[in-house]
Each structure stands twice: as C-alpha cells, then as structure tokens.
Amino acid sequence: MSEEVFTTRNFPSFPSRSLSVPDLPVNNHGVGKTTSLSQRSHSFQLNTEPPHHTRRNTIQLSNMEPDSTQFWGYVSLFVTYLLFVLSMYAIVVSKYIPYTGNKYLDWIKEDTYYCLLIPITLFVSVYAVFWNWLGMKFFRHN
C-alpha cells in the first residue's frame, strides 16, 4: 500500500473574490451571464457606522480610572446573602427559639404578617421594575 502525502496541492483551494457569480438570466432560455464580484455595479462593503436607532457612546472612560464593577458585584452578592439570612431567620428560625427578652427579636417571633410581607414585596418589586423597563423599551423603539 502506498501512503499519500498530503500537501497544499491536494486540498481544494478557497474561493477568491474574482469568482464568477451567476446573475439574472439574459435571454429566454434561462442561460445566465456571469460577472466577477469586482465588476458588479454594487459593492459588498460592511457598514462600519452604527445604526441610527442605537445610543451613541458619549462617555469614554480612561484606562487610568479604576473600574468599580467588581466592587459593586460583591456588594450586591453580600446584600443578597444578608437579606436571605435575615428573611430565613424571620420566617423559620424565630418561630422555634424561645423568647429572648429583646423586644425586637420577640416582636419578630410573634409576627406573622411583616416577616412574609418584606420577602414577597422584593419579588413583586423586581417584577414591576422589569415590566417598567420593558414598557420603556417598547415606547422608545416604536
């Protein structure tokens, strides 16, 4: 058995820009005329300008200015964790511990309304903010 050596000559070449592209038929027999891309009347250039309906980037931050995205990400994670722990204490844990003598902790233990109102209000708030944002997008882009 002979082994074939693969070289660049054995592989098909990629098409170049001067390939013939079929155009509209020129006679009644359906025979099309071919022209190269460089001879066509219109060009296929990409538009580098943004569409008119997009927002322009007017604020350019320098590379020397510190980026606070990571800081605010950790702050939002910490606040989420804190709200979760406090809500679980108010809803579940406080009902099973004895009275402490602290008027705030005892009020949370006896409460059956506000311990559920605050966590449920957070979910409804996120839902309302989302629909408000969606309505604004529909208004601005129509």
Image: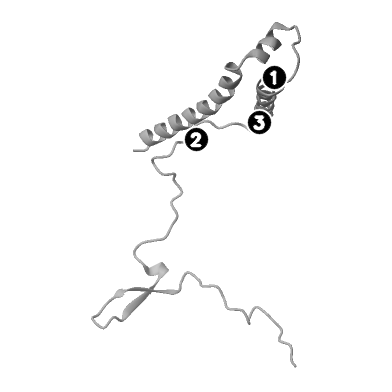
* Quarter assignment of residue 65: top right
Residue at the spot x=38%, y=36% of the render?
138
Instruction: Tell which circle, 2 or 1, labels the residue nearer the N-terminal end.
Output: 2
> In this figure, which residue is indicated by the disc labeled 3?
73
Residue at the spot x=47%, y=28% of the render?
128
- In what quadrant of the picture does the N terminus appear? bottom right
Mark 2 or mark 1, whichever is nearer to me:
1
Residue at the spot x=65%, y=13% of the render?
110
Position in image of residue 140 (x %, y %)? 37, 34
Count of number-bearing discs: 3
Q: Which residue occupies the extreme bottom position in the image? A: 1
Q: What residue type is labelled 3?
A: Gly
Evaluate whether residue 24 shows in this view. Answer: yes
Position in image of residue 104 (x %, y %)? 68, 9
> In this figure, which residue is indicated by the disc labeled 1?
95
Residue 134's place in the image compared with 23, above or below, is above
Residue at the spot x=74%, y=88% of the render?
3
Mark 1 or mark 3, whichever is nearer to me:
1
Q: Is residue 89 left or right of residue 118?
A: right
Position in image of residue 105 (x %, y %)? 70, 12
Instruction: Tell which circle, 1 or 3, labels the residue nearer the N-terminal end.
Output: 3
The span from disc 3 to disc 2 (Cα, nearest Å) is 23 Å
Position in image of residue 119 (x %, y %)? 59, 24
* Quarter assignment of residue 121: top right
Callout 3 secondary element: helix
> In this figure, which residue is indicated by the disc labeled 2?
57
Instruction: Give yes or no for contact between labels 3 and 2 (Cβ–Cβ under 8 Å).
Output: no
Q: In this view, does 43 lie to the left or right of 98?
A: left
**Label 1 packing within 10 angstroms: few (<14), some (14-19), many (20+):** some
